[in-house]
Image: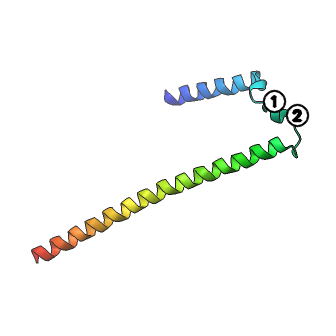
Amino acid sequence: MKTLRYIASTSALVGAWMILPEVTLACERCFGAGLDSPIVTAIGISMLALLAMIGVVFTGIISFFNQAHNRSRSIAEDERESSDTTTA
């Protein structure tokens, strides 16, 4: 049932997109501007800067979880070694 609902909602969105193409057009600043326009260049650079920031944040999140995983593994190994030496 969820698959049918997903297909229906996706079809409705695509249909609305085709009926209202002005929604998908460029903004009035970029629409008539050429590729060498300073506004288009600035928007392109700002998009790259935002993508770089997303990459930095994503890398930080991954490194945090990697460090937490390594620490938990280290603590588990230390506890295993200490329990082995106390039982021996």
State the residue at coordinates (53%, 57%). Answer: 59
- Amino acid beneath label 1: Glu
- Along the horizontal axis of the image, is 35 left or right of 66? right
Kindly identify the amino acid type of the residue bearing the numbered disc 2.
Gly
Vertical side of 63 occupied by 10: above or below: above
Q: Locate residue 46, reporting x and y percent.
A: 71, 46
User: Which quarter of the picture shows residue 55?
Assistant: bottom right
Q: Nearer the viewer, residue 6 or 60?
A: 60
Identify the residue at image location x=31%, y=68%. 74
Q: Which residue is mark 1?
A: 28
**Viewer-proximal residue, 13 or 70?**
70
Q: Secondary structure at mark 2?
A: loop
Which residue is at a point 50% across and 56% down the rendered structure image?
A: 60
Q: Is there CB contact under 8 Å for labels 2 and 1?
A: yes
CA distance separating discs 2 and 1:
7 Å
Q: Is residue 82 left or right of residue 50?
A: left
Image height check: is 19 above or below 72? above
53 in relation to 86, above or below? above
Residue at figure coordinates x 89%, y 41% from the top left: 34
Say which mark, if any, is on residue 32. Answer: 2
Where residue 77 sits: x, y (%)?
Answer: 27, 69
- The x, y position of residue 8, in whole percent, is 60, 25
Q: Measured from the top left, where is residue 41 in percent x and y?
A: 80, 46
How would you rate the neighbour count of disc 2 (Cα within 10 Å): few for under 14, some for 14-19, many for 20 or more? few
**To which quarter of the image does residue 4 belong?**
top right
Q: How is the image coloured?
A: rainbow
Q: Identify which residue, 71 or 77, lies in the foreground.
A: 71
